Image: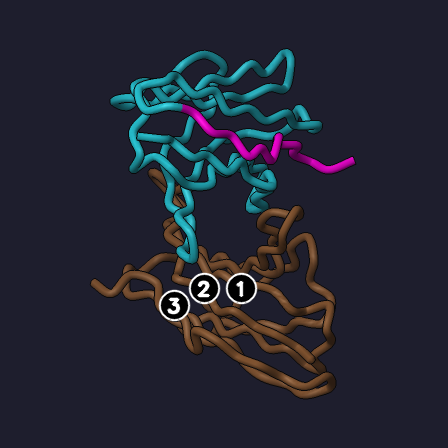
């Protein structure tokens, strides 16, 4: 199993550009989520999904869109990048029953918006 | 007020020391309490989780929850240089996870 994979590993965007961060898992997990990690702020939940076709907002959803058309994939879209979105982004997945809260994290995407 | 507060450290201890890491939380509805370890430039990995007050042991690690005080702790016995990492507490209610800011730990050989 590859676990949770994220692409790209690094990205530099200009203000106003859009892009999609990719996340995939091969563990057949129902629950998937996106976090951003900033110094002094910890990990903050952006959006999450409890299954294909179901998404919901987390703590800091503004400026980001998600969709979940398959169990495996959960892309995060930045609609119009802003310098405040410079961060490290982590995708995570877990089952939703029995050990439900053992989230597996991907390696992260380091995004810089200039 | 943040949902979870964690002392950011940094914390530096000699090898073999007992380490205590702590978090406080604000919402008594929180259900599950977890500790993650994150090495530099890596994603977090789950160390332990519990849903009740009291202690839970796993090898050199002990997680402690005091729901009456809204306080959770992680103790590391016989700390090793390989324990050098950032430790994050996390608390769950419903489908929402709230993480502390992390405590940076260095264990000096």
Q: Position of residue A31 (x, y in %)?
A: 44, 55
Question: Looking at the image, which residue is at 38% across and 31% down?
Answer: B107
Q: Position of residue B27 (x, y in %)?
A: 69, 28
Q: Quick one: label 1, few (<14), some, or many (20+) residues within 10 Å?
A: many
Q: Nearer the viewer, mark 3 or mark 1?
A: 1
Residue bearing the label numbered 1: A89
Q: Is residue A69 visible?
A: no
Question: Looking at the image, which residue is at 29% across and 37% down?
Answer: B82
Same chain for mark 2 and mark 1? The answer is yes
Q: Position of residue A33 (x, y in %)?
A: 51, 58
Q: Position of residue A20 (x, y in %)?
A: 54, 81
**Is the C terminus of chain B in the top left, top right, bottom left or bottom right quadrant?**
top left
Q: Quick one: label 2, few (<14), some, or many (20+) residues within 10 Å?
A: many
| Front residue (pair B14, B39) | B14
Same chain for mark 3 and mark 2? The answer is yes
Q: Is residue A32 above or below residue B80?
A: below
Residues marked 2 and 1 touching at CB (< 8 Å): yes
What are the residue bounds of the magenta stretch? B1-13
Q: CA distance from mark 2 to mark 1?
A: 5 Å
């Amino acid at each position: 199993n590859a676990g949770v994979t994220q692409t790209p590993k690094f990205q530099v965007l200009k203000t106003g550009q859009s892009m999609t961060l990719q996340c995939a898992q091969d563990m057949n997990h129902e629950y998937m989520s996106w976090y951003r990690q900033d110094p002094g702020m910890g990990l903050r939940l952006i959006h999450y999904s409890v299954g294909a076709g179901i998404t919901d907002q987390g703590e800091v959803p503004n400026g980001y869109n998600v969709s979940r058309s398959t169990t495996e994939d959960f892309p995060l879209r930045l609609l119009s990048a802003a310098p405040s979105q410079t961060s490290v982004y982590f995708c995570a997945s877990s089952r939703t029953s029995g050990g439900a809260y053992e989230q597996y994290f991907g390696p992260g995407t380091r995004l810089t918006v200039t | 007020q943040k949902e979870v507060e964690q002392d950011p450290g940094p914390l530096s201890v000699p090898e073999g020391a007992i380490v205590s890491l702590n978090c406080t939380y604000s919402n008594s509805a929180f259900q599950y309490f977890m500790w993650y370890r994150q090495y530099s430039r890596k994603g977090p990995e789950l160390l332990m989780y519990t849903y009740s007050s009291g202690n839970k042991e796993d090898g050199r690690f002990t997680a402690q929850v005091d729901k009456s005080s809204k306080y959770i702790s992680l103790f590391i016995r016989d700390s090793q240089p390989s324990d050098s990492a950032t430790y994050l507490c996390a608390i769950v209610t419903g489908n929402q996870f709230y993480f502390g800011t992390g405590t940076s730990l260095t264990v000096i050989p």
